[in-house]
């Protein structure tokens, strides 16, 4: 199954208007972490757009695993233009039990 097919089996209550993860797509040109988010995000939320020379990121579909916060120095340190928070109560992913 593709990642998108697997994500379709997971329930999300996504807050479309308030992204819980914020990045600066242009600042990612000078990433100090080798853009490790692109390969470490299990939901493939980060895509380096070579033509536009910037990061494409969509918080919708985030699994809240925290990988990007670990591998991205700017997210980890809360650099200007970067922040990582859990979604507001009631929003985000709901995992099935069992
Ligand atoms: Fe991807 Fe996990 Fe970061 Fe969400 S928290 S964007 S699933 S790496």
Image: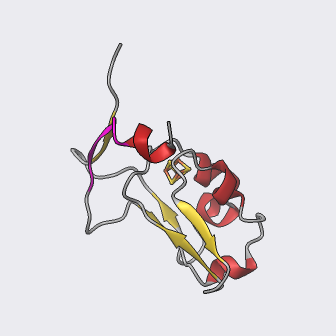
Viewer-proximal residue, 1 or 96? 1
* Residue 40, position as x, y percentages in the image: 66, 49
Magenta extent: 8-14
- Left or right: 6 with respect to 75? left
Question: What is the total number of numbered labels drawn onto the structure image?
Answer: 0
Viewer-proximal residue, 36 or 66? 36
Res 11 → quadrant: top left
The residue at the far front in this view is 1
Res 29 → quadrant: bottom right
* Residue 20, position as x, y percentages in the image: 39, 59
Please, is residue 8 above or below residue 95 in the view? below
Image quadrant containing the C terminus: top left
Viewer-proximal residue, 67 or 10? 10
Q: Residue at x 39, y 51 (%)?
A: 61
Q: Residue at x 59, y 50 (%)?
A: 41
* Residue 39, position as x, y percentages in the image: 68, 53
Q: Residue at x 72, y 58 (%)?
A: 36
Please, is residue 5 above or below residue 28 in the view? above
């Amino acid at each position: 199954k593709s990642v998108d097919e697997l994500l379709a089996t997971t329930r999300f209550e996504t807050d479309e208007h308030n992204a819980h993860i914020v990045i600066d797509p242009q600042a990612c040109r000078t990433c100090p972490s080798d853009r490790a988010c692109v390969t470490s995000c299990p939901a493939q939320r980060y895509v380096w757009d070579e033509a536009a020379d910037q990061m494409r990121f969509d918080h919708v579909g985030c699994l809240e695993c925290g990988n990007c916060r670990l591998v991205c120095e700017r997210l980890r340190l809360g650099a200007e233009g970067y922040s990582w928070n859990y979604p507001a109560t009631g929003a985000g992913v709901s995992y099935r039990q069992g």
